[in-house]
Image: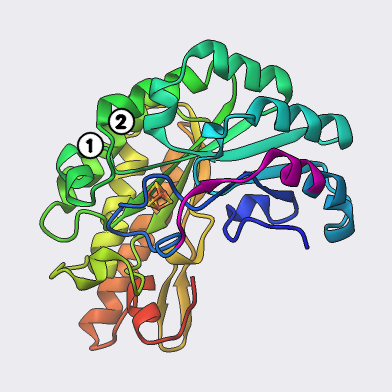
Amino acid sequence: MIDLPPFRPPSEASSYLLRVVRGCNWNRCAFCAMYRDLKFCQRRKDEILKDIDNLEKFFPRSNSAFIGDSNPLIHKDIVEIVEYLKKKYQVSRVTAYARIKTIAAMPESKLKSLKDAGLTRLHMGLESGCEEVLKFVNKGITPEEAIKACRKAKKFFEVTYYVITGLGGCDMSLSHAKDTAKVLSYAEPTFVRVRNLTIIDGSPLSSRNFKTISAKQQLEELKMIVAETRAKTYLTCDHISNYLFTKHGPIFFGVSGNLPEDRDEMIQKIDDAIELVEVIEKSGGKVFTSNDMYKLGLIML
Ligand code: SF4
């Protein structure tokens, strides 16, 4: 039986999935429960190559491949593995999750070897550009490392940076959004993918006394990130955690677009949503964030 990565970005839904490591070698971020009970290990090269041989038995023919779990570029044979994958399949896109800390420390010669082998895109979790928030959630990176890692990686690959609205809670909401926009402006990732904080059972944050932001604050953070990010990038809210809901269904689906070209249009959509939330709440209604919906058991992540 092939060993598949249990998580992948939504944009990799139709990719071949290849598991190179199991779990996360950091595994300490307070908001994350993805690999909490999994002991990190590098899979054996012969097993991985055999999985590559068998990919087409498990997936419809694809033009792309995704490599997991959370930080697969630390596998000692990663260059050879990517080369083998590229030789076997006509894939134009090969992507992987990567830790910012790992990329910040990796020599450019290694990144070049990975590019030459066929790797084309990295998915990395920035989560916040605010030093205080990064410390609070135990991300194990600094804003400076995040800028360095992205600028270095972009010489070789497309880079996605993930950010999480609400990660600073109510107390650090403003500095979280402002500093995130600042880091994105310097880092200039190819893509920014926004998620809203949803406190998952089993994550360290679920047992802390943490005041989550409201629907309106979520929109205000998103607006600040869109308004103040000066990089040329594509920003998208391609995940259900960005949605806002009433008891009748979703009322906001996030925004997506190129910065700076689509900035005004995106801000207008967010302003419209802020106005709608105010109207609903003034008339006694309730607007639910992904966090509320998860707690009520109405969405799964
Ligand atoms: S967010 Fe990423 S780096 Fe942090 S514990 Fe989860 S998988 Fe590991």
Q: Is residue 243 left or right of residue 183?
A: right
| Residue 289 appears in view | no
Q: How far across and down, in percent of the image, does residue 89 sit?
A: 87, 37
Three-letter amino acid code of the residue under disc 1: Asp
Q: How far across and down, in percent of the image, does residue 106 sit?
A: 45, 20
* Scheme of image coloration: rainbow
Q: Are marks 2 and 1 in contact (CB under 8 Å)?
A: yes
**Which residue is pictured at 72% across the width and 32% down the height?**
81
The front one of 296 and 225 is 296
The front one of 202 and 192 is 202
Badge number at residue 183: 2
In this picture, which residue range is highlighted in magenta?
A: 38-50
Three-letter amino acid code of the residue under disc 2: Val
Q: Which residue is mark 1?
A: 179
Q: How far across and down, in percent of the image, does residue 191 sit?
A: 52, 37
| Residue 159 appears in view | yes
Q: For mark 2, does the 10 Å Cα neighbourhood hold few (<14), some (14 to 19), or many (20 or more) residues?
A: many
